[in-house]
Image (cartoon, rainbow, N blue to C red):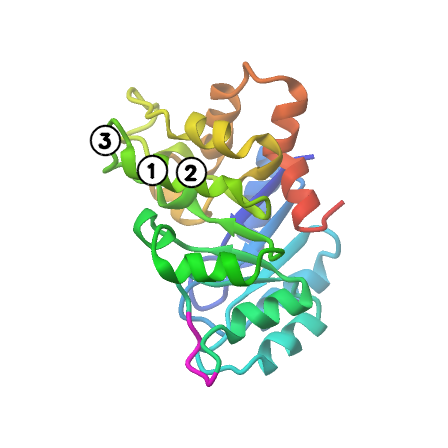
Amino acid sequence: MIVDTHCHTGLDKYEPIESLLFHLDSSGVDKAVLIQHAGNTDNSYHLQCLNNYPGRFASAMIVADNDDGTQIRSWAEQGILGIRLRADSRADTADPLAHWRVADELGLIVSAPCSPEILLGMAFQEVLSTFPDLQIVLEHLAGASQQMEPPYTVFQSVLKLAEHPTLSIKLPGFGEFCPLPYPFTQVRPLAEMALEAFGPKRMMWGSDYPPVSSREGYRHSLEFPRQYLSSLSQGEQDWIFGRTAASIWRMI
């Protein structure tokens, strides 16, 4: 089973679910996680997608900064089992950690946009120490980018966060951190570094559809990392491209 853990869909921004389904089916992807796009706190279209295609999708909501947890609970009760929180996110409420706290209480999965600087900052350290059992998935290879250069000192520091067992990491299409155009002629070793730190059971592939269409394209965002990591055992590949996501996002 192949699971794409980072897809955006919508009616007012990006593409409707039918466009995503075309790419999933064309590339042999079985399931996907719908990640709400920044600035949208109306998660009703995600719910529509979950209901129209039962068993095929999971979803991560976004709520308003001033939500005291009421909306998080409401969306969760309707079937959304994840929430998108920037790694240094703080609520505009009496309890700045309210969103993290409710996510922890409800057992939600946090999909966390981040940068290396944010991940190494005190705000995220507070989250990790306060909610040690909360499942947090670091988006976009923990903020890896094409601007990173050897010896990757800051990225190496970020990867030390793998000592926290409830942290996992998304492996994006390599166009996010390798110079374009495709096919890549210079492949930075960031994927191997992350794999060594987190292991295959805490790494999950995510295409970043539809923004990936302006990089290497959807099919290549899966095809290239599968070829690049083909020296791994079949079991390790199965974890990275499906089993890790299915386990954490409860899609088994």
Residue at horizontal 70 percent and vertical 72 percent from the top? 78
Along the viewing direction, whichever of 75 and 19 lies nearer the viewer = 75
User: Label 3 sits on what residue type?
Assistant: Glu
Tell me, yes or no, if residue 87 can be seen here: no
In the displayed structure, does residue 146 sit left or right of residue 43? left
Please identify, in this view, whether the residue under mark 1 or under mark 3 is nearer the observer: 1
The vertical placement of 151 against 4, above or below, is above
Q: Position of residue 227 (x, y in %)?
A: 50, 20
The answer to whether one can see residue 46 in this image is: yes
In which quadrant of the rendered view does residue 182 lie?
top left
Q: Residue at x 52, y 40 (%)?
A: 163
> Which callout, 1 or 3, points at the residue further toward the start of the chain?
3
Q: Which mark is residue 159?
A: 2
In the image, which residues are magenta? 90-94
Few, some or many residues within 10 Å of mark 3 (<14, 14–19, 20+): few
Residue at coordinates 30% horizontally, 51% vertically from top-left? 117
**Main SS, magenta residues:** loop
Q: Nearer the viewer, residue 120 or 218?
A: 120
Q: Quadrant of the C terminus?
A: top right
Q: Residue tagged by mark 3? A: 149
Residue position marked by numbered label 1 in the rendering: 155
Q: Kindly identify the amino acid type of the residue bearing the numbered disc 2.
A: Leu
Mark 2 or 3: the one toward you: 2
